Image: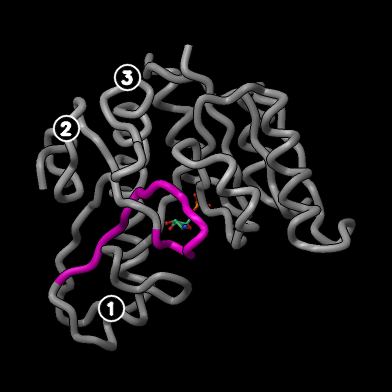
Amino acid sequence: MFDVVVFASGRGSNLAALLEAQRRGAPFAIRALLADKPGAAALDIARNAGVPAMAFSPRDFPDRAAFDRAMFGRAAEFKPNLIVLAGYMRVIDTAVIDSWRGKVVNIHPSLLPKYPGLHTHERALAAADAEHGSSVHFVTAELDGGPVVAQAHLTIEPGDTPESLAARLLPLEHRLIVASVELIACGRVALDRSGVRLDGKPLRRPLRLGDAGLAPG
Ligand code: GRF
């Protein structure tokens, strides 16, 4: 089985979507949930599904690198094929993330390379963008800057607010993260030195989420 460890900081709805996909027979198994906040709702979602869940508090560590070494070290005990950052709100130490290259993906609520970092819905509205979306990307040392695997697109409607965009985007994000992890678990998508490959060929543009799942972008 393709083993996955999920990192989360909060609500955990993307974790719940992955767990639901697993119950329906997706080709991966969530082996553990690690949080950087002891109160994260994601911890309860994992425990209720019988998945080991544990929190580490950054305050208990001298610096970012020590914290990240502890988190990734604990994750490594589950021998994951992939770590999924699902609403994990921390920048990861460069040396730690470099040693996991190709083994960590993140879901970010913007059409990367637009709007890395925070407040993506506000920024898309302020720029009067016609569309918004979410991206799943391999994680590198550059914040929200790693190679993108797949995106979900959302048309911005007149009257949209950050809240309405977030609400419409979330169900698309759930489908996007599940479909992306499935492709990686099947061995169809991987990161090599030159970038993302799909079925062994360079992926020139991110895959795009449609009604029937992920398709060429
Ligand atoms: C999602 O919008 C994701 O794109 C962002 O944080 C949110 C996580 O939500 N990185 P949840 O904790 O999975 O419900």
Residue 104 to residue 30: above or below: below
Q: Which residue is drawn at the image coordinates 74% and 56% (left, top)?
A: 65
Say which quarter of the image contains residue 44: top right
x, y (%) of residue 59?
A: 86, 62
Asked which secondary structure carries label 3, the reply is: loop
Residue type (three-letter) at the residue carrying disc 3: Cys
Q: Crowding near pointer 2: few (<14 within 10 Å), some, many (20+)?
A: few
* Left or right of 182 in this view: 90: right
Which comes before the other along the chain, label 3 or label 2? 3
* Residue receiving disc 2: 201
Residue 96 to residue 29: above or below: below
Residue type (three-letter) at the residue carrying disc 2: Lys
Residue 62 to residue 118: above or below: above
* Left or right of 32 in this view: 156: left
Q: Crowding near pointer 3: few (<14 within 10 Å), some, many (20+)?
A: some
x, y (%) of residue 208?
A: 16, 46
Q: Residue 108 has which mark? A: none
* Left or right of 26 in this view: 196: left
* Left or right of 60 in this view: 28: left
Q: What's the distance in space between the residues labelled 2 and 1, CA to CA?
A: 32 Å
x, y (%) of residue 22?
A: 44, 21
Which stretch is magenta?
Answer: 131-145
Q: Which residue is drawn at the image coordinates 39% and 25% (left, top)?
A: 21
